[in-house]
Amino acid sequence: MTARADKIKIMRERVTSKRVVTILIVMFALLILIAIIALAMGSERIGFQAIVKIIAAKITGQSIDIASEQQVIIADIRLPRVLMAIVVGAALSVAGAAYQALLRNPLADPYVLGVSTGAAVGAIAATIFAEAISIGRPLAAFLGAVLTIATVILLGQSRRHAQTERLILAGIITNTFLSSVVIFLMTSASGLRLQSVFSWLIGDLGSNARLLPLVSVFIVAGIVIIYFNSRSLNLMMTGEEEALALGVEVRRVKAMVYIASSLITGAAVSVSGVIGFVGLVIPHAVRLAAGSDNRFVVPASALAGGIFLLVADTIARTAIAPRELHVGVVTAFVGAPVFVYLLRRAS
C-alpha cells in the first residue's frame, strides 16, 4: 500500500509537457546568457559585440577587425573552457540523478560513491603509463568507473539484495581506498607531469580541450540512454518488486543505467579531474523545484549542471585574479553544506 502511494505521489509530481518545454527553454536561454557573461569576464574584459564577432568568425572562418590578442583569449582559451564546464557539469549532474534514482537515496552521486575517484585512478594510470595514446585516458577512466561501481554494488549486497545504506557506506570505503591508490600513482610521476596530475586531480577545466569533442560524444550518448530509461526509473523508485509487477525489466534497466552513468562519469573525469558534489547538489535542487519525474529531472539536471559548473568556474578564475582557484574548491564550498543537510534530513 505504501509503495502504491509512493507511485501515485511520483505520478502527481510530474509536470505537464507544456510546462516541461517552457522550463527547459528558459534554462537553455539562461545557460547561453551565463556563457556569454563568462566569456566576457576575466583579467581582460571583452565586449559582447566583440565576443559575437569572434565566435562567428571562428565558425565561418572569416577575418575580422578585432585585436588578435582578444581573438586568442576568446576562441582559444575562454570558449573551450566554457564548453568544458557545460559538458562536464551536465555529465556529472545526470550521473548523480541516475544513481539517486537507482539507489533511491539523495546522498548518492559519482563522488560519494567513489565512481569519480575510480575514473581518476584509470585516467592517472593512462596519463603516467600510456600518455602517447590520446584515447587512452577516456577509455581508462571509463574502465575505472565501471569497475568501481561494480565493486560498490558487490560490497553493498546483503543476503538478498543491495541496501542503499550499505551501498553508500561501501562507496565511501571504496573512495577512501582509491584515494590511497591515487596517491601511490602520483609517486610514480615526477616534474611537470606530477604538477599536471595534481592540478587536474582537484578539478581543472583549463586543459585537455582537444579531448572535448571525443568525450562529448560519449557523454551525449550516455545521457540519451539514461533519458530513454527515465520512465522505468520512475517506476523503480517505488520499489523493484513493484516495478517488476508493472512490466519493467529491472536487471536490464539497472545494467544499462549503471553502465551509462559510469560512461559519462569516466568521460567527464578524464578531461576535468575529480570535481565533487555537482551530481549531489543539482539533481536534488531540480527535484525540490519540480518533482521527481525523471523524464524532466534528467534533461533539467543536464542544463542546471552546466549552469552551476559554469558559474563555479567563472568564480574560480575571477575571484582572486590574476591567480585562479580550482573549480573543485568552489563546488565543495557549496556541496559540503548541502551534503550535511541531506545527511541530517535522512537520519
Image (cartoon, rainbow, N blue to C red):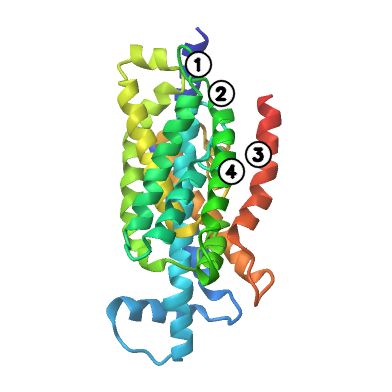
Q: Depth check: 5 or 346 in front?
A: 346
Label 1 sits on a secondary structure element that is: loop
Q: Above or below — where is 176 with respect to 205? A: above
Nearer mark to the viewer, of 4 and 2: 2
Query: Residue at 48% across / 20% down in the picture?
Result: 157
Among numbered discs 2 and 1, the one appearing first in the sequence:
1
Q: Which residue is mark 1?
A: 158
Is 12 above or below relative to 219?
Answer: above
Q: Is residue 320 left or right of residue 312?
A: right
Q: Are marks 2 and 1 in contact (CB under 8 Å)?
A: yes
Task: From the image, tell me which residue sits under label 4.
Answer: 281
Q: CA distance from mark 3 to mark 4?
A: 8 Å
Q: Secondary structure at mark 2?
A: helix
Image height check: is 106 above or below 238? below
Alpha carbons under labels 2 and 1: distance apart:
8 Å
Residue linked to disc 3: 339
Regarding residue 326, the answer to whether it shows in the image is yes
Mark 4 vs mark 1, CA separation in Å = 28 Å
- SS type, badge 3: helix
Does the residue at mark 1 contact the one at mark 3 (Cβ under 8 Å)? no
